Image: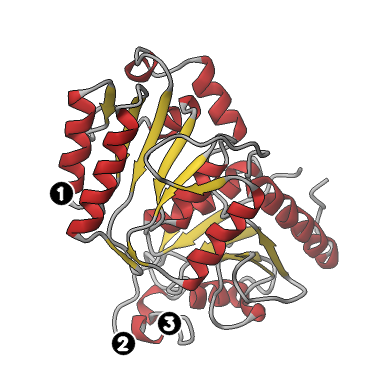
Amino acid sequence: MPDITAWILTDGKAGDEQPCIGVAEALGLSPAIRRVAPRPPFSWLMPWGPIDPREAPARPGSPIAPPFPDLLIATGRRAVPYVRAVKAASGNRTFTVILKDPRTGPSAADLIWVPEHDGLRGPNVITTPTSPHRISAGRLAEARRDPDPRLASLPGRRVAVVAGGDSRHHRFSAGDIERFAGLVAQLAQSGVSLMITASRRTPAPLREALARLAADGRGFFWDGTGENPYVPILALAEAVVVTADSANMVGEAAATGVPVLVFEPSGGHPKLRAFIAGLERHGAVKPFAGHLEAATYQPLDSTPRIAEAILAGLARHRRALGLPGTG
C-alpha cells in the first residue's frame, strides 16, 4: 500500500469515534482525528444543511482545513455536511466513507456501511451483522497472553459483566436495576468470578450495587482508576453479560466467541431488537437469566470485512483518478 493519508471525522462522541478508529486500525493506518462543532442554527439543519461557515476549509482553525486526506472515515449526523464539503473542496480526490445511515441517502459518500438490520441499501452500501470496533482478534489474543494481574488472580471461571445505562431508547428503572443486580448476584452465587465494568451512563444505584457484588464475593469492579481493563475483561471471560442499551457493546462482546447473555432494560427500539435477534440466530446471544448458558459460534468481528470493502473502493477510486493504487 502506498502512503495513504486518512482523517476520522466526527463531532467527538466516543461512541462514534472509536468504531472509526477500529476500521482505520484494521487498514493499518494512523489517521488524524478531526472533530466538528457546528453552532446553531447550522447544527439544527444537519445532516441536510450546510456546514457552519466558521468551520469552512479556508477558515483558520477549521477542522477540515487542507491538505485533504486520501481517505475520510466519518460518522454522525453532524459530520455528514462536512463530508460533502471535503469531497467538493478536494476536487473529488478524497475517498469518503460514512459509518451508519447518513439519513440523506446513499449519495452522501463514496461508501456507506450500515448494520444488516438497517434499511438503507444501494450499490455503494455494505452491510454486516455487527458494528465495527477495536476489539480485534489480535488485541484479545495479546490480552490473554499477558493477562491483567487484577483479573488473572480471580479464581475459577471468570464472567464479564458489561453494564451500560440510560440511552436514547432505553431507561434503567428502579425495577430494572433491582432485577439486573439480582440476576448478577444469582450468577455470582454459582461460584464464578465477576469482572465488572460500567459506563459513564450507568445509573449510580446500579453502579453501587455491582461494586458491592464484586466486593462481597469473588470479583473485580473497575472504579475508573488505573488502566481501563475493558479488553482484558472480554479476553479472559468464559461468558459475557451485557446490557442491551448499546449495540456497540453487544457487538464487541460477540467478537470474543464466548456466550453473550443480554439483559434488556425498559424501552427498546425495533432496530436494536432486530440486531439482537440476528445475533441469536447466529448462536451468539441468549437472554440473561442469572446463570451461564452454553453457546458455540464463530467470533463475530465485522471490522476486517468493512476494512476490505474500503480498501477495494479506495483502490478503484484512485485508479479512476490516475493515482497510484493501493496494492
Kindly identify the amino acid type of the residue bearing the numbered disc 3. Met
3D distance between C-alphas at marks 1 and 3? 33 Å
Going by the numbered disc 2, the residue's amino acid type is Pro
324 versus 37 height, above or below: above
To which residue does mark 2 refer?
41
Q: Nearer the viewer, mark 1 or mark 3?
A: 1
Q: Secondary structure at mark 2?
A: loop
Quadrant containing the C terminus is top right
- Mark 1 and 2 residues: CB-CB less than 8 Å, in contact? no
Residue 325 in picture, x, y percent from top left? 82, 52
Pointers 1 and 3 in contact (C-beta within 8 Å)? no
Q: Is 176 or 5 nearer to us in this picture? A: 176
N-term-proximal mark, 2 vs 3: 2
The answer to whether any part of residue 66 appears in the image is: no
The secondary structure type at the circle numbered 3 is: loop
Q: Which mark is residue 46?
A: 3
- Any mark on residue 204, and which? 1
